[in-house]
């Protein structure tokens, strides 16, 4: 999995400089995505995909979380009914489903996630969000580049993104 690093910049010039610094360090512009509120000129900056602008990660996560909870509680009801009716094979199956949904939910809750909804205030001030997708081993390198060469950059966190989706989601 790739890591998605989030950096806020006060203006387009500082964001362009950061992109140039990253490109000089062999980070492709295909791994970078810029966002701001509608009306802010992002020409010359790496574009974001429509799914990134709509924050599809958050929507997919919410949908899967709802499905996971629904499955867990359905299995819980089936477990209770099967214990009452002494159908222990069905009770065991329901218990396995509950353990699987709990484990899946716990696994994904421990993954760091950042959603664009947290940046609305910054976007209202015309700030620009630069997202950089890199393998886990390059996270420190990107952070070091931006901390040393772009003091106006504000590090806003790190999230994960699947490697096959990192360039377009």
Image (cartoon, rainbow, N blue to C red):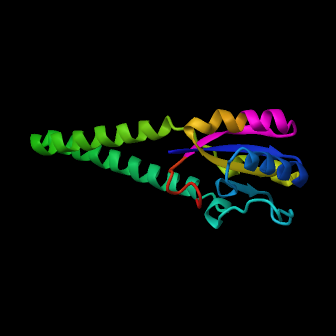
Is 147 drawn above or below residue 129 in the view shown? above
Q: Residue at x 30, y 49 (%)?
A: 74
Front position in the image: 11 or 75 = 11
Question: Is residue 121 shown to the viewer in this render?
Answer: no
Residue at left offset 77%, top offset 50%: 129
In the image shown, does 70 or 112 lie closer to the viewer? 112
State left or right for residue 126 relative to residue 133.
right
- Relative image position of residue 150 (x, y in whole percent): 84, 39
Asked if residue 165 is positioned above or below residue 119 in the image, the reply reads: below
Quarter of image, res 136: top right
Residue 145, by quadrant, is top right
Left or right? Give the position of 7 relative to 106. Answer: right
Residue closer to the observer: 52 or 92? 52
For residue 140, what is the image quadrant? top right
Residue plotted at (76% across, 47% down): 24
Residue 109, image x, y percentages: 49, 38
Tell me if residue 78 can be seen: yes
Left or right side of 110 for 3: right
User: Residue drawn 64% across and 53% down?
Assistant: 31
| Quadrant placement of the C terminus | bottom right
Whole-percent x, y for residue 100 in the image: 30, 41
- Magenta segment boundaries in residue numbering: 144-160
Residue 48 on image: x %, y %? 69, 61
Q: Is residue 168 magenta?
A: no
């Amino acid at each position: 999995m790739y890591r998605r690093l989030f950096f806020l910049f006060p203006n387009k010039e500082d964001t362009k400089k950061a992109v140039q610094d990253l490109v000089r360090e062999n980070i492709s512009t295909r791994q970078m995505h810029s966002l701001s509120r509608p009306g802010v000129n992002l020409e010359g900056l790496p574009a974001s995909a429509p799914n990134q602008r709509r924050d599809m990660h958050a929507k997919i996560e919410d949908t899967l979380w709802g499905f996971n909870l629904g499955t867990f509680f359905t299995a819980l009801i089936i477990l209770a009914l099967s214990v009452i009716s002494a159908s222990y094979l069905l009770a065991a199956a329901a218990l396995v489903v509950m353990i699987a949904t709990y484990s899946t939910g716990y696994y994904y809750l421990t993954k760091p996630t950042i959603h664009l909804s947290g940046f609305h205030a910054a976007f209202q001030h015309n700030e620009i969000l630069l997202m950089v997708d890199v393998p886990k081993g390059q996270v420190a390198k990107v952070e070091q580049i931006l901390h040393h060469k772009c003091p106006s950059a504000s590090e806003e966190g790190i999230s994960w993104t699947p490697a096959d989706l990192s360039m377009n989601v």
